[in-house]
Image: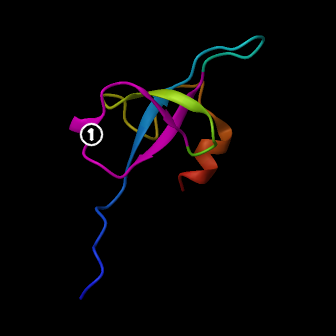
Amino acid sequence: MSAPTLAAATVVAARSRAHGPTSALWHAVELHRPTAEVDGACELTLCGSLARVDVEQPWPTPARDVCPACVVLSR
């Protein structure tokens, strides 16, 4: 019996919410399912934050307000 194969992961952008004195940032989310199944709910980002996925926003995003940890972790 062979082991099941996993689909290749897709990295998409997600927008976090501003919390207290911090501003909202763009984060990277690694999806292991089709983007059509993502309903805009919050997902766990590469850095461990929760952020709302935006499959229309490419990663890496050209925005200036990007999570530095996600930039490093997505390489």
Which quarter of the figure is the C terminus placed in? bottom right
Give left or right: position of 41 versus 15: left
Q: Does the magenta stretch include residue 32?
A: yes
Q: Which residue is drawn at 69% across and 14% down?
A: 19
Furthest residue toward bottom: 1
Placement of 57 over or under 68, stated as above or below:
above
- Badge 1: few (under 14), some or many (20 or more) residues near its Cα, within 10 Å? some
Residue 44: % across, % down = 53, 39
Query: Mark 1 sits on what residue?
Result: 35
Residue 34: % across, % down = 24, 45
Q: What element carries label 1?
A: helix
What is the magenta range? Answer: 25-45
Displayed quadrant of residue 1: bottom left
Name the residue type under label 1.
Answer: Thr
Give left or right: position of 45 versus 36: right
Q: Residue at x 54, y 34 (%)?
A: 27
Is any atom of residue 62 visible in this view? no
Displayed quadrant of residue 3: bottom left
Residue 28: % across, % down = 50, 40
Furthest residue toward top: 20
Is any atom of residue 39 visible in this view? yes
Q: Does the magenta stretch include residue 26?
A: yes
Placement of 75 over or under 55, stated as above or below:
below
- As rendered, which of 68 and 15 lies closer to the eye? 15
Placement of 65 over or under 37, stated as above or below:
above
- As rendered, which of 22 and 40 lies closer to the eye? 40
Q: Residue at x 78, y 11 (%)?
A: 21
